[in-house]
Amino acid sequence: MSEAQIAHRRLVQSLYKRSLKTAQDWYIDTNLFRRKAVELRMQFDANKNLRHPRQIAQAVQEAERQLTELRHPDPYIAVSAPGGTKFERNMHPNLDEPAGHH
């Protein structure tokens, strides 16, 4: 597999993953999200057999445009991730530093 093919594969994989993440922002219910994930997979599979570079570029560009349009204004952030509501809450004390005595 050539370097260009590897780069293209990574681009499409990244686009698919971002599409799933965006869908998860909109569909909190697991059943609704799963249906949307299947639809997304069908869309990506429909373009899997494109061979002409112009058609491939157009399909990727269209998917990027849709992803930008559908971006959620308040995306889901896992509670313990940076920016999440529990991030660094209840941090463990640093045992390497001696406790100050009052």
Image (tube, helix red, strand yellow):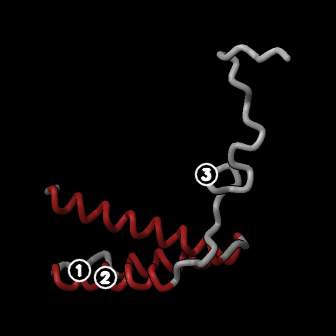
- What residue is at 45 percent from the left and 79 percent from the top? 67
Which image quadrant for residue 78?
bottom right
- Reply above or below: 26 against 95: below
- Reply above or below: 86 against 69: above
Residue 57 circle label: 1
As helix, strand or loop, the secondary structure at mark 2 comes to: helix
Amino acid bearing label 1: Ala
Instruction: Where is residue 32? Give x, y as percent.
Output: 68, 78
Q: CA distance from mark 1 to mark 3?
A: 34 Å
Q: Are marks 1 and 2 in contact (CB under 8 Å)?
A: yes
Instruction: Where is residue 19? Give x, y as percent.
Output: 48, 73
As helix, strand or loop, the secondary structure at mark 3 comes to: loop
Instruction: Where is residue 57? Give x, y as percent.
Output: 23, 80
Mark closer to the chain start, 2 or 3:
2
- What residue is at 23 percent from the left and 60 percent from the top? 7
The residue under label 2 is 61
Please name which of the two marks, 2 or 3, marks the residue nearer to the observer: 3
Mark closer to the chain start, 1 or 3:
1
State which quarter of the image contains the C terminus. top right
